[in-house]
Amino acid sequence: MSTDAKYPPGPRGLPVIGNTIDLSRDIFAFFEELRDEYGRVASYEVFGTDACMIAHPEAIQRILLDDHEAFEKGEVLTRNLADAMGEGLFVTGGDQWQNQRTQVQPAFYRERLNTYVPEMRSTAEETVEQWRDGMVVDVNDTMTATTMDVLGRTLFGVDVTENPVVSEASDAILAKFDTNRFWSFLPGRLPTPTNRRYRRKLDELQQFVDELAQQRRKREYDNRGDDLLSILVGFVESSDLTREEFRDNIITFLFAGHETTALGLTYTLLCLAQHPDEQAALREEVNTVCDGDLTAEDLPKLEQTENAISEAMRLYPPVYMFFRETARDVELQGYTIPEGTTLVLPQWTVHRDPALWDDPETFRPERFAAENRQEYAYFPFGGGPRHCIGMRFARMEMKTILAAILSEYSFELVSDPNPKLITSTNLRPAEPIEIELHEC
């Protein structure tokens, strides 16, 4: 750890491994203790890597927006995700990232997103049609299947639910990066059973993506459509995108496009299942606004529904921390942080900070109806030029699916109200979250 007096303070770690054991025991408790004992900018060490937790909204805004060019994605992120999506939009930087962002952007224009809503609605309705009064539903499994189906129909124009390769690869990635397991901090090149399974399932996923591309290329150009898959295949054919960039971007959207959305819905349903009054208020809003047939024009009017989703993602952010690395020496909140330092921006810690939120542990959607919260005290989709490109798609999808559920069923929680969580690439429940359905 640096001895510079201006370097952020932090706990002493063990030789070689630093603070890794404390991190793996409970990453949320570790960051909360850092915040409370050392401040919202604090240092720690993982296997010889100097790291700083940045949990101050002003510093987060500086990193993600105001001075974003001074902060790169960094070695931690690129090293961990290099095999899966190293040439994709989420990991790349500089001109390569800018070029890919420009290429992908048309698939996420508002006008284009509006055309996805009927498919989102019909997919959600097909899910709900399989339910019955008194049925107990595993929320995360059901929402994962539904959002995967939506993703395939809208962005790829294919049914991606028939092949288990995506879900199996997702499980392998979850196991590899599970921070509750000490070995997740070990180098990926070590031939552990977890690493071997990860490599095998990733190979299968890459082959699946290559087959998707081959099938789309066989179509006549005028018969390809204008979904994301066709857009990216066209860029490969014109040599504006390499095959590696194509593959890694498809993998990026396969995961980012369904898993985070499914988790957002899972945690929204978890919260609503424990708050019947909120649930009833949303149902009334849905029935009043949609009148049984939701359209893209209805979605902005579902303000209470939007607030409930936002509040659930405050309490349970699917992406629970971001990584950056300093590209030069920087000053943050009075501290000097050297070039090459890993920065961790923990949404969970910031979203539940009692100095930033009244009664932070309580589900109160109405707090998002007010416009008085501090900028970057809430950042589930990141911020600045590298904010999640699929943010609007995800919010539209979550509101559409939630509206389909609320229009047909009320529900109550029949599993643990405080489920154990897995902190891996995303924040996932370690056990089933189950609701019992009741026809309206």
Image (tube, rainbow, N blue to C red):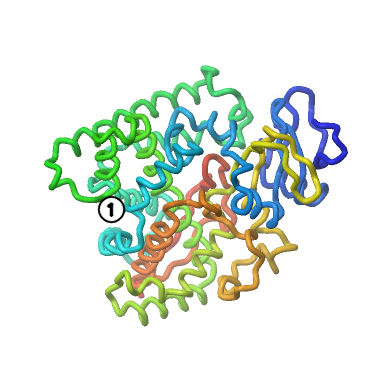
Instruction: Give the image quarter of residue 407.
Output: bottom left
Whether residue 129 can be seen here:
no
Residue 380 sits above or below residue 84 on the image: below
Mark 1, residue position: 154
Q: Please state the total of marks drawn on the protein image.
A: 1
Circle 1 sits in a helix, a strand or a loop, which is it?
A: helix
Q: Find residue 304 and report its horizontal and vertical position in percent.
A: 48, 74
Q: Which residue corresponds to the image point at 39% horizontal and 28% vertical from the top-left?
A: 201
Residue 233 sits above or below residue 138 on the image: above
The reply, left or right, for residue 126 in relation to residue 21 is: left
The local crowd at label 1, few if under 14, some if 14 to 19, many if 20 or more residues have their Cα within 10 Å, is many
Of 342 and 32, the residue lying toward us: 342
Q: Find residue 364 and report its horizontal and vertical position in percent.
A: 59, 70
Whether residue 134 can be seen here:
yes
Amino acid tagged 1: Thr
Of 354 and 39, the residue lying toward us: 39
Q: Which residue corresponds to the image point at 40% horizontal and 42% vertical from the top-left?
A: 100
Q: Find residue 306 and report its horizontal and vertical position in percent.
A: 47, 69
Residue 364 sits above or below residue 96 on the image: below
Q: Which residue corresponds to the image point at 58% horizontal and 42% vertical from the top-left?
A: 423
